[in-house]
Amino acid sequence: MARTSEKLLTADDLLRLYSGGVRGELIRGALYKTTPTGLTHGEIVMNLGGELRNFIRPRRLGRLVGSNSGMMLERDPDTVREPDIAFISAQKLPLNVRLSGYYEGAPDLVGEIVSPSDGPREVYHKARMWISFGVLLVWVVNPENRAIEVHRSNQPLLSLTENNILDGGEVLPGFSYPVRDVFDL
């Protein structure tokens, strides 16, 4: 993801650009444009997101959102990131509250699907960035090697293969999903 602006922008600027057809994220006020990621990426988002939704919704645990949902992580300069999948607990954002703009704060869980244009270092740093802002659980899903890295604060990195089960840990106790099924397109 390449920086596209020298001028520092605000979250409000980003919303205006988005309504004009520009898609991107702000990192400390700098705009980084994003591009569509491809079919496999979208299918994995739907597989994992669908399973999460089937677990979260009947239990009324919180909100599950996709990649067009910006997360305002800091202000002045503003940082707004778009996770591929994010869960925000009902404790942080009550189910009866509707937001018209960005969610201000860190979600509880983030799922990031590695795109062909992502470098391994970039993805690792993005996962650690989420943790540094207070996300409790980050799943980095790699379609190329059909594996998932599990990042948690102050815990060692856990690598899962197709023979493992992905779980929701302390964020979504009781959630489990075979890693193999994440990639079953």
Image (cartoon, helix red, strand yellow):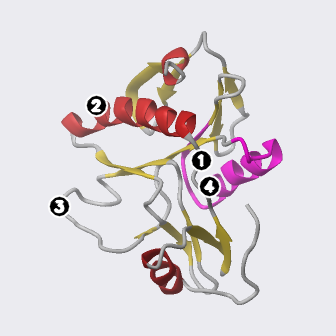
Q: Earlier in the sequence, mark 3 or mark 4?
A: 3
- Tell me which residue sits at (50%, 60%) in the image: 106
Residue 48 placement (x, y as % from top left): 45, 32
The N terminus lies in quadrant: bottom right
> Which disc is residue 130 wearing?
4
Residue 141, which numbered label?
none
Look at the numbered discs 4 and 2 and tell me whether their residues touch, using CB distance below 8 Å. no
Q: Earlier in the sequence, mark 1 or mark 2?
A: 1
For label 1, the residue is: 37
Verify CB contact (< 8 Å) between mark 2 and mark 3. no
Please give left or right for residue 171 compared with residue 80 in the image: left
Numbered tag placed on residue 96 in the rendering: 3
Nearer to the camera, 46 or 163: 46
Q: Which residue is mark 2?
A: 54
With respect to residue 104, does 140 lie above or below?
A: above
Instruction: Say which of marks 2 and 3 sits in front.
Output: 2
Magenta stretch, residue numbers: 116-140
* Disc with the residue nearer the chain's start (1 vs 3): 1
In primary-sequence order, the first of circles 1 and 4 is 1
Disc 1 and disc 4: Cα gap in Å?
A: 20 Å
Q: Dot 3, crowdedness within 10 Å: few (<14), some or many (≥20)?
A: few
Quarter of the view holding residue 176? top left
**Judging from the image, what secondary structure is the residue with disc 1 in?**
loop
Q: Amino acid at mark 4?
A: Trp
Label 2 CA crowd tier, 10 Å (few <14, some 14–19, many 20+) = few
Residue 176 on the magenta segment = no
At x 59%, y 47%, the residue is 37
Q: Nearer the viewer, mark 4 or mark 2?
A: 2
Q: Nearer the viewer, residue 157 or 80?
A: 80
Question: Closer to the camera: disc 1 or disc 3?
Answer: 1
